[in-house]
Amino acid sequence: MKLGPRVIKTGIAVTLALYICSVLNLESAVFAGIAAIFTIQPSIYRTWKQVWNQAQTNVLGAIFAFLGLYFLGNDPFSIGLVIIILISISLKLKMGETISLTVVTVLAIMSAPGNDWLFALNRFIVTFIGMATALLVNIFVYPPNYKKNYVNKINDIFRDFSILMKTAISDEMTEKSFKEQMEQLENDIFLLEEQFMLFDEEREKLSKLNNMDVREIVVFKQMFKSLQKGFMVLEDIDSIYFTSKPTPEENQLFDQHLEYLIKYHELFLLKYNGKIKMDSPSFEDEFMKKSELFLEEVMQSYHEDHKIQMTVIGASIYHYAFQLDRLNTLVEQYRKKSH
């Protein structure tokens, strides 16, 4: 079992929140731990945003809880009524994401024995300690390295993707294995998109703290689009290629061109990583020309045999090649301006 940074940070935040409450002699420290759990998010910005939103709704919840204590008391029916009213208002104010902790805050305050206001205030403070602890832990403990994580994820996904692409036409994998690998690849690409959105959001919202080059963000986005388009090619091959009953010559044509594209996809990623000399002879000059010749040959097959499926897949592969060519252009522009 592998423990991710977020799991570890959540444990540290809960421990630290409980420890602070014990040092300050604050009762009901468990609510600090709960607040820390709700506050930890996958990025520093989202954690800060969560703290800010929760602070607003918690203050609102505390006000309602204290009013409920004063006018209604702390019997179960009063607590339930206050929670219903608070949830309705939170949804109206579009603060639904923080409802859970706000409800916990109301329960913490209104369950104070005998309308003890100091005890209720103590629980309110304890909740804020948990939130603040989670934010500090997310900033200083295992601070996320979005760039490194993203590039590593790209390389890992490409490795699995290239195996599927190389065996898609040759049909060397068992159908069960191919399906399982496709499902895993689809899930990985979905998670990659979420990861890209995380660090792009972090760069935009915390630009003064994170000086990531905007050109590099564009390169990262194109890396994702290239993999996404490549996955669409695999889906097209899986769903319609073999229904057209391809000839051995067509199998060879498609298989060789996919191998060719995978080779250059890998080279473009290596170029970004600085593993290919920028002053070496340009090996991409004929890249799109070869893809155009491939599409023309596929179209010729359509005119002769009316294999519309081949044309659809040929166009999909050409679009994948176009995305790769754009990736190469963006990588070259980025590396030339950064060196």
Image: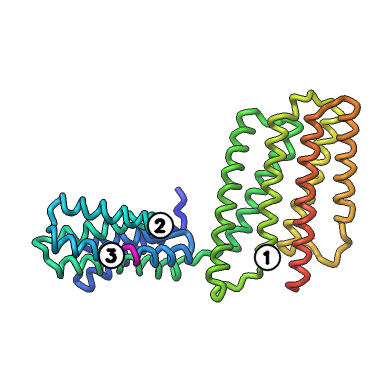
Q: CA distance from mark 2 to mark 3?
A: 22 Å
Q: Which mark is residue 139?
A: none
70 or 40: nearer the eye?
A: 70
Please say if 244 is above or below 292.
above
Residue 94 among magenta residues: no
Outermost residue to the left: 114
Q: Which residue is mark 1?
A: 216
Q: Which residue is mark 3?
A: 127
Residue found 74% across the figure and 39% down from its top: 166
**First to last magenta residue range:** 55-59
Indicate the quadrant containing the C terminus: top left, top right, bottom left or bottom right.
Answer: bottom right
User: Which label's residue is closer to the chain start, 3 or 1?
Assistant: 3
Q: Is residue 230 left or right of residue 201?
A: right
Magenta: predominant secondary structure element? helix
Q: Position of residue 69 (x, y in %)?
A: 15, 61
Please say if 312 is above or below 3.
above
Of tags 2 and 3, the one toward the viewer is 2
Query: The residue under label 2 is which amino acid type?
Result: Lys
Outermost residue to the bottom: 208
Secondary element at image label 1: helix
143 or 330: nearer the eye?
A: 330
Q: Position of residue 303 (x, y in %)?
A: 90, 29
Q: How many marks?
A: 3
Of tags 1 and 2, the one toward the viewer is 2
Residue found 60% across the figure and 42% down from its top: 186
Q: Which residue is mark 2?
A: 94
